Amino acid sequence: MLQWATISKLRSSGANIMKWEEYFMRLSFTAWSLSAAMAVTMMHGTTAVSAADAKAPGLAHETVMTGLESPWDMAFLPNGTMFFTEKCKGLSVRMADGKVNALLGMKGSSGYASTADDLFCEGQAGMMGVEVDPKFADNRQIYVYSTSSKTAPGSNRLMRLKVSDDFAKVSDRTDIVTDVPYKPKETAHPFGGPGAHNGGRVRFGPDGHLYLTTGDTHNGVVPQSPKLIGGKVLRMDRDGKAIADNKPPEGFDKRIYTYGHRNVQGIAFRPSDGNPVVAEHGPWHSDEITVLVNGGNGGWDPRPNQAGRGDCPANYCGYMPNQMEGMDPKERVKFMPMTDTKTYPDAMPPAWNNNGLSQGTSSAVFLTGEQWGAWNGRLAVGIMGIGFGGTPVGMRIDVIDLADDGKSVKDVTSMSLPMPAGRFRSVVQGPDGSLYAAVDGGDIYKLTPKKK
């Protein structure tokens, strides 16, 4: 269990609370063996998670990069060139021959071709998602989501950058989204320091549009707000303008594709129909995988004095009740549901809720190609692991077979990993058909199905 009493004492003493929270999280992780993390007896709804599937491919692994500082996301060109971000350092590119060029550094970074002093990291905030324009060969554009001090007291923004022909630098920065909320001050919540809950994944969909996921920033009014674009999934063009057939409710920001989210850090697109599917962190319970519906409400509403609740610390009920204490997730969910179908009966139903547990679902990608065998077309989800209140840490990659209607799952299998598990922050399929997985500890792995 996380040592919340000790953290509270450190907070009152003025210590760097985010550093100590990270320290205790790591103590929690190392206290569990890998076998516990792979929890083969866990049930998701009515579907068992198995550590090995007779029809699943065997996996070989290669360490592509190591010694990084909190790698957050990756994006590939067809020849294997890989752009990647490090949360508190910046944007780099690994060429197909393995050479690495440091492109855009954040404030305080060194060794980069250029730096941007307005870009900074704090808590969970920093440089996060990266995506390559599908028309890169023509326009050489990439997109990066980062926290910035340009707008007081800080904001998250989506930047468009142009990559030089020799991949040695970026230029022509254009901030196409500048108003994603940022949490500037500490509050009395778990992981309550500045920079909480930013979302951060940016992806082009098969419809050619740009999707951006955002977080609720520990602010009770944000997810259901018509104008604040935190706790949302946005759908835009290359200039950050709303797509005409977005269907948010009347009076909502037209960039909004869906709303009522907590902290979406994963978005992928189902090969069969192109529908966007998101992976979302739960509040001490109920991580969720949800197939999105244009204009839909995710049902997260952490405002006080709603749904039978009273006041909550800092007007945010996201960890209530007993927010600093472990308790049965089934009891907690009655008070603060992840998807509140009583208040919002038309809320989008999650297909999967991690057996009602919160272990930190992060990015997601659909595996495609015959090399994946029985997993071809299934959703791979990176899980970072949070062992609060007796919950198994659960650092793993799950492979999820979604039902055709997107409202349930047919099967969930945990990958039998050929390397140590870690906090899987990003999973991306490369142009070679392998799965690339970045862990917070500083490694990027390549997982390749073995030929049978």
Image: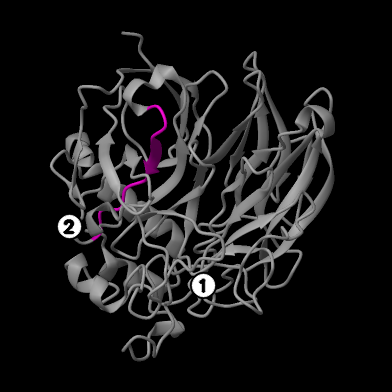
| Residue 296: percent from left, percent from top | 51, 66
* Residue type, mark 1 in image: Pro
Residue depicted at x 51% and y 43%: 268
| Residue 442: percent from left, percent from top | 47, 35
Instruction: Name the residue carrying label 2.
Output: 390
Q: Is residue 183 left or right of residue 26?
A: right
| Residue 64: percent from left, percent from top | 50, 21
Residue depicted at x 42% and y 69%: 347
Res. 228 in view? yes
Q: CA separation, marks 1 and 2?
A: 29 Å
Depth check: give the residue in front, 4 or 424.
Answer: 424
Magenta stretch bounds: 376-388
Residue depicted at x 25% and y 53%: 387
Q: Relative to 205, is 96 above or below? A: above
Q: Extreme right residue here?
A: 172
Q: Circle 2: is it few (<14), some (14-19), or many (20+) Cα within 10 Å?
A: few
**Quadrant into which the C terminus falls:** top left
Q: Circle 1: is it few (<14), some (14-19), or many (20+) Cα within 10 Å?
A: many
Q: Is residue 237 left or right of residue 365?
A: right
Q: Relative to 442, is 255 above or below? A: below
In what element is the residue under mark 2? helix
